[in-house]
């Protein structure tokens, strides 16, 4: 059977409360640029807000002026979204707890996930969000999934419970050497 090969996330769409609350949170707190605001073409009376999540991918919300925020946690049953993770830089990550506190938003505080650090909190409509920061930078010519796949193999071979710093460092070294071995060797020339 021929597969349908996907090439990335196009966008995620959530049901939000109203325009003001969603824009205040996603643009005002999380710094996402509102790039498109138009009617929901499938549901009269509803707007469709498009935000740039920071990497050129879109996060969208269906909103209505008559809806109010519902901070009750979203269901976590089969088929429901558990949480949405958003990437932040290390310097932003170090300020997340303080900035959420300034807005009165409860959060988990920093959590070490082995290959990344995370902080969890909820948006005004009960959606669990994670601000995540990788602990590493992928070698040039490699991707974050490349590093994670190699670190996973190393972890499994070692019989370790989860990916740790040592697995990441070894993966980065392995990927760096693999890249070096396939690059053409440049002859050194000396002026003579």
Image (cartoon, rainbow, N blue to C red):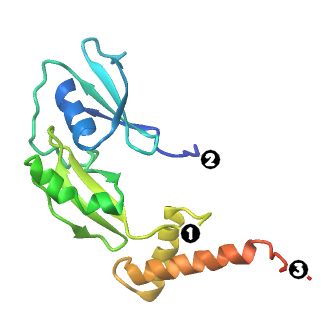
- The numbered disc on residue 1 is 2
Q: Please identify the residue farthest to the bottom as the structure is shown.
A: 158
- Between label 3 and label 2, give the one nearer the viewer: 3
Residue annotated with mark 3: 191
Classed neighbour count for the residue bearing mark 3: other residues with Cα under 10 Å, few (<14), some (14–19), many (≥20): few
Going 50% across and 63% down the picture, which residue do you hit? 145
Whether residue 102 appears in this view of the structure is yes
- State the SS at label 1: loop
- First in residue order: circle 1 vs circle 3: 1
Is the residue 92 above or below the residue 110 in the image?
A: above
Is the residue 159 above or below the residue 33 in the image?
A: below
Residue 27 shown left or right of residue 136 in the figure: left
Classed neighbour count for the residue bearing mark 2: other residues with Cα under 10 Å, few (<14), some (14–19), many (≥20): few
| Residue 118 location (% of width, % of height) | 27, 63
| Residue 76 location (% of width, % of height) | 20, 49
Classed neighbour count for the residue bearing mark 1: other residues with Cα under 10 Å, few (<14), some (14–19), many (≥20): some
- First in residue order: circle 2 vs circle 1: 2
- Rounded to the nearest angstrom, the CA distance separating label 2 from label 1 is 35 Å
């Amino acid at each position: 059977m021929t597969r349908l090969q996907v090439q990335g996330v196009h966008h995620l769409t959530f049901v939000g409360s109203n325009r003001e609350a969603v824009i205040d949170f996603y643009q005002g707190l999380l710094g996402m640029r509102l790039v498109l605001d138009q009617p929901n073409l499938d549901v009269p009376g509803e707007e469709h807000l498009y935000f740039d999540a920071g990497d050129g991918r879109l996060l969208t919300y269906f909103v209505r002026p008559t809806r109010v925020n519902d901070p009750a946690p979203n269901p976590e049953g089969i088929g429901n979204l558990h949480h949405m993770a958003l990437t932040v830089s290390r310097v932003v990550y170090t300020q997340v707890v303080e900035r959420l506190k300034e807005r009165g938003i409860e959060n988990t505080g920093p959590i070490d996930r082995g290959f990344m650090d995370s902080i969890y909190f909820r948006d005004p409509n009960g959606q669990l969000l994670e601000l995540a920061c990788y602990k590493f930078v992928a070698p040039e010519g490699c991707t974050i999934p490349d590093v994670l796949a190699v670190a996973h193999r190393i972890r499994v071979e070692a019989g370790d419970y989860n990916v740790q710093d040592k697995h990441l460092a070894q993966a980065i070294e392995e990927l760096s050497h693999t890249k070096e071995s396939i690059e053409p060797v440049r002859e050194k020339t000396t002026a003579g």
